[in-house]
Image (spheres, rainbow, N blue to C red):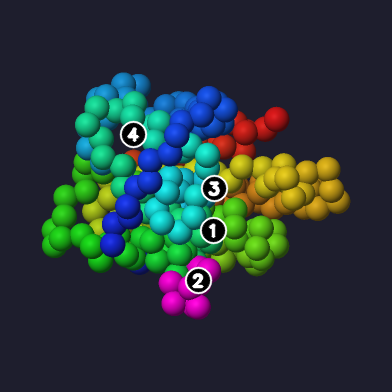
Amino acid sequence: IHMMNGGPPTPIKQRRSKMNRRRWVPIFLAFLLVAPLSVPAFGWDKIVAFGDSLSDNGSGICLASNGPVWLDYLADSMRDVELEDRALCGAQTDGPLIAGNTINIGMIQQVNDYLVSLPANADLSGTLFSVWIGGNDLLALGPSEEIISAAITNINDALQALVFAGAKDLLVMKLPDLGLAPAFVNTPLSSAYTSGSIAFNIYLTQLVCDFRGAFTKVKFYMADTFALLQY
């Protein structure tokens, strides 16, 4: 797939648990593998996150984690870094609508809402943006080529909007293996969702490669959560 076309949340502090920490630490470590060597020397003073329950640390819709998510650990590991978590539990790359079809919680809307909130000529050079999305597209609509292609197109549009707004550092997360989700593991559907996750990640990797080639002054990082979260 080659595209390349031209109210802040209120954090909810959750009690930390050792089990939850073990779950998120591998993802945090994955980022360290693809980012510069010295965490405090990144030069970022803020992290802005878009996505679904895998990144949502309590923004008012719902909360799927029983404690801090990987973003909390990442922000805590850096000096004086603010975390603005706009990810929403249940989000797809675009939609769904909730509250009587009046609120769009999708990633595209998350990015649009963020960009509208920015002051004119905002300096985003000190901000790391993270995007981890797509799982709910496949879970809700099926792991078909059509659904995967539409999700990648939406991610393309979101990344492009952020880059055009001045984003300089973007972290894009691959999908974990959806075939290992409790609803599918050890069922006939497991292989289909594993294959769908692999296909999604192949297209996502190509998309990020295209962005790297088109925007050489912007840094794009990727973390392979598919491999890290195998068990």
Q: Does the magenta segment cover residue 55? A: no
Residue at numbered disc 2: 98
Neighbours of disc 4 within 10 Å: few (<14), some (14-19), many (20+)? some
Left or right, 193 with respect to 12, comes to right
Identify which amino acid the numbered label 1 is placed on. Gly
Quarter where residue 75 is shown? top left
Q: Amino acid at mark 2?
A: Ile
- Residue bearing mark 3: 64
Q: Nearer the viewer, mark 3 or mark 4?
A: 3
Q: CA distance from mark 3 to mark 2?
A: 17 Å
User: What is the three-letter code of the residue carrying label 4?
Assistant: Ala
Mark 1 and mark 4 residues within 8 Å of each other at the beta carbon: no
Q: Position of residue 81 (x, y in %)?
A: 25, 35
- Determine whether label 1 and label 2 are within 8 Å by CB: yes
Q: Is residue 212 above or below residue 120?
A: above
Q: Which residues are magenta?
A: 95-103
What residue did someone put label 4 on? 75
